[in-house]
Structure formats: C-alpha cells, structure tokens
Image (spheres, rainbow, N blue to C red):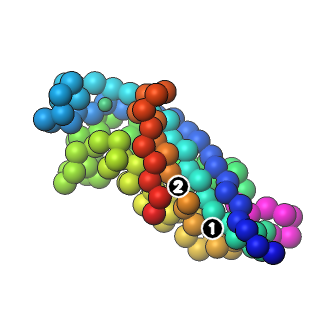
Amino acid sequence: MNGEYLLSAETMFAAAHTLPGVDMCARLHGHNWRVRVTARVPADRLDATGIGVDFRVLEQATREAVADFEHRYLNELDAFRDRPPSAETIVRVVADRVAGRIRGHPSGATIAEVELWETPLYKVSYRP
Ligand SMILES: [Zn+2]
C-alpha cells in the first residue's frame, strides 16, 4: 500500500514575549498561541485496530511540549536563552520536543509539520 496518513492535533497556550529590535514587537506583549502538530504515518504501518497514532497520544505530546510556556514570559525560559522567542524559534522548539515524544512509536510516526499561530491571521509552519 502506498501513501501516508497525516494526523493532526492542536492545543493553545497564553504567553508573553518581546523581540528586541523588531518594531512594535520590542514592547512586552502577549498572544494566545495556537499550535497544530501533524504527524506522518506510512499507510502500511497502521496497527491491528487500524490506527496510525492515537489522536489522544498526539494531543498529549503536543500539550506536554508547550506546558512550560503557559502564562510565562518566554524570553526568560531556558529554551530561548540563546535565541529570542519569535514564532519561528518557538515552532522549532515545539517540533523538536514533540519529535522526541513520538520517536520510537510502533507506527514509525514522524513529524510532518508544526504550525504556530501568533494571531488568528499570522501563522508560521516548520517542517523538520
Ligand atoms: Zn508577539
């Protein structure tokens, strides 16, 4: 069987950041960030119940990946000590963390894409 399945789960978190040197973003402000993680499973790797990755497993991994961001000033976190918490760097951290959590899944699932909305109109995507 050819092809692949793409499975997605989402979560949200509220957090503040500043981006020094970036116009208005240099001011302290916050967002209600929305995150969607999409996992890729080869079509011939479904389990006996017909599932690639249980949505709840993907959702849990996504929630855990951003748990320490909730109601925090992101610039203070170790994850952003060496790089400012722009949407691009945040989405990369989330992708790396979720990849670590689903690595070794029996389906051979990998991260296809992580999307991060800073506002309902602004989104960045990262594909490992
Ligand atoms: Zn911002």
Q: Is residue 36 left or right of residue 90?
A: right
- Residue depicted at x 22% and y 33%: 18
| Quadrant in which the C terminus appears | bottom left
Res. 14 visible in picture: no
Kindly identify which residue carries mark 2: 113
Circle 1 crowding by C-alpha within 10 Å: few under 14, some 14–19, many from 20: many
Quarter in which the N terminus is drawn? bottom right
Amino acid under disc 2: Glu
The residue that appears at 56% across and 60% down in the rendered structure is: 112
Label 2–label 1 contact, CB within 8 A: no
Span highlighted in magenta in the image? 47-53
User: Callout 2: helix, strand or loop?
Assistant: strand
- Residue 35 shown in magenta: no
Residue 61: which numbered mark, if any? none
Residue ID at (17%, 28%): 23
Residue 32: x and y in percent read 44, 28
